[in-house]
Image (cartoon, grey):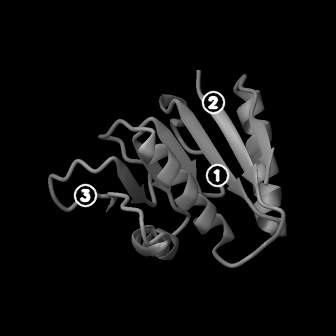
Amino acid sequence: MTRVDFYVLPDQKDNGRVLLACRLIDKAYHLGHTLYVLAASEAQAAALDDLLWTFRQDSFIPHERYPLTGENDSPILIGTRLAPDRHAQVLINFSNELPEDFARFERVVELVDQSPEVLAKSRERFRRYRDHGLTPETHKL
């Protein structure tokens, strides 16, 4: 059964959710997990892609944009639609929708800040996960 975790930031800062994603990606990568990051837009995907190279000086997080341009087998993919041809253990969802086929992932991570739109859409997804018989966990940061 898929585990769903909502990480709730106490404020609404520029790049707050993206920086949180980088920290969670770094941790999951070092635990040996494979990840897919579902960005809400191409601009968000590009910002996350850039930030993963620079958010910490001492870290290296191999990642690639989806769709893939080569044969690279990076443990972390970033895209704006779900990658149908690749297995990943963890899905980090930046989209405003409940991801299609979310149940194929072992874990789904939702990142929430205090933006009214983000809060409203997150509450809706929380209810929809519960409608699917899951019990999402909330982590207030």
Q: Which mark is residue 52?
A: none
Q: Please, what is the three-letter code of the amino acid marked with disc 3?
A: Leu
Q: State left or right for residue 88 relative to residue 41.
A: left
Q: Are marks 3 and 1 in contact (CB under 8 Å)?
A: no
Against 139, residue 67 (above or below) is below
Q: Amino acid at mark 1?
A: Glu
19 relative to 101 in the view: left or right: right
Mark 1 = which residue? 97
Closer to the N terminus: mark 3 or mark 1? 3
CA gap, disc 2 and disc 1: 17 Å
Q: Name the element at disc 2.
A: strand
Q: Earlier in the sequence, mark 2 or mark 3?
A: 2
The quadrant where residue 12 appears: bottom right
Q: Residues within 10 Å of mark 2 (few under 14, many from 20)?
A: some
Instruction: Compute the Cα span from label 2 to label 3.
Output: 27 Å
Residue ranking furthest to the left: 71
Q: Which residue is mark 3?
A: 68
Residue 3 at x, y percent in the picture: 63, 30
- Could one spot residue 98 in this view of the protein? no
- Residue annotated with mark 2: 3
* Dot 2 or dot 1, earlier in sequence: 2
Q: Is residue 120 visible?
A: yes
Q: Quadrant of the C terminus?
A: bottom right
Badge 1 local density, few (<14 within 10 Å), some, or many (20+)? few
Q: Residue at x 49, y 40 (%)?
A: 90
17 lies left or right of 70: right
Q: What amino acid type should be assigned to the residue bearing mark 2?
A: Arg
Which residue sits at x=20%, y=62%? 69
Spot occupied by residue 59 in the image (x, y as percentages of width and height): 41, 62
**How far across and down, in percent of the image, does residue 96 sit?**
66, 57
Which is more toward the observer, 54 or 106? 54
Q: Foreground mark, 2 or 1?
A: 2
